[in-house]
Image (tube, rainbow, N blue to C red):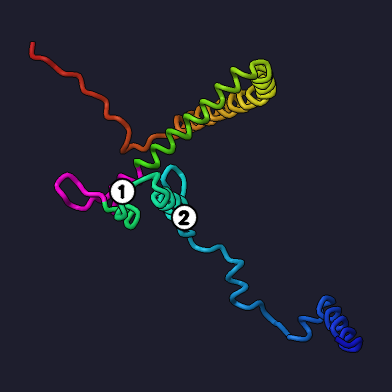
Amino acid sequence: MSLKVCNLVVIEFQSLTRGGYKGRYNMKSTPLYIKNLLQPSAKSPTSRKVWSVDLENVWLPFLTATNTMGDTAIPSDALGSPIRLAYDKDGSVKFSKTGRVVTKVVKPIADSVTLIRQNFVANLQNYAEQVANDEKEGYANQVRKAHVAGQPIIAHDKEELDKAIQLQIAEAIAQAELEAEQPVPEAEQPVPEKELVTAQ
């Protein structure tokens, strides 16, 4: 690239960075596709979660991989159609009280996730127990530090909660007193009971 061309590129870049872009292209309004990027979109598409983990992008690839390696034997139809319609006892399609169709994750996948979850929890517990046994002093020190550090926060939250409850009680009392002062319309006033007269 010649020196003359380089100088032209630098001048062009300086022109653009100093506001020359608007003058050069005469943009009077933001393009619609840019405006759309800045608008809140409708509800983002939600995927089915199993144990709060994405079914389509995490569980299915993982379980397909474990099948490939021979570690699991999940049926192909379960991986191919992991979400099924739920049915009532009479065999009809199940609907929720709001009228939405009810679906469920197929049993082999749900069972596999349950097993993984149980093993995960067991591993966490075993690790914690092992460290607590092998590093007794360090573990106990961590527990003490956490307890001391947490006390001011717990005390502050308790104080704020007490204040909030007292405020709610005061507001409820004030509201009840205000309603008690309101005159009851005549139509709503209770009719006094008449005394029963018995024959002598």
Helix, strand or loop at mark 1: loop
Residue 60, x across and y down, in percent = 41, 52
Quadrant into which the N terminus falls:
bottom right
> Which quadrant holds residue 137?
top right
Amino acid type assigned to the residue bearing label 2 in the image: Asn
- Label disc, if present, on residue 106 of the rendered structure: 1
Quadrant into which the C terminus falls:
top left
Amino acid type assigned to the residue bearing label 1 in the image: Val
Q: Of helix, strand and loop, which mostly describes the magenta segment?
A: loop
Residue segment shown in magenta? 86-110
Instruction: Name above or below for residue 90 compared with residue 127.
Output: below
| Horizontal relation, residue 7 to residue 183: left or right | right
Which residue does the image show at 66% across and 26% down from the upper left?
A: 153
> Which quadrant holds residue 20?
bottom right
- Label disc, if present, on residue 57 of the rendered structure: 2
Which residue does the image show at 45% across and 30% down from the upper left?
A: 180
Residue 100 is at least partly visible in this image = no
* Residue at mark 1 to residue at mark 2: CA–CA distance: 16 Å
Instruction: Name above or below for residue 42 compared with residue 191.
Output: below
- Label disc, if present, on residue 24 of the rendered structure: none
Nearest the viewer among 135 and 151 is 135
Magenta segment: does it hold 96? yes
| Horizontal relation, residue 172 to residue 100: left or right | right
Residue 145 is at least partly visible in this image = yes
Characterize the local packing of mark 1: few (<14), some (14-19) or many (20 or more) Cα atoms within 10 angstroms. some
> Which quadrant holds residue 154?
top right
Instruction: Name above or below for residue 65 compared with residue 160.
Output: below
Instruction: Name above or below for residue 127 compared with residue 56.
Output: above
Residue 54, x across and y down, in percent = 46, 50
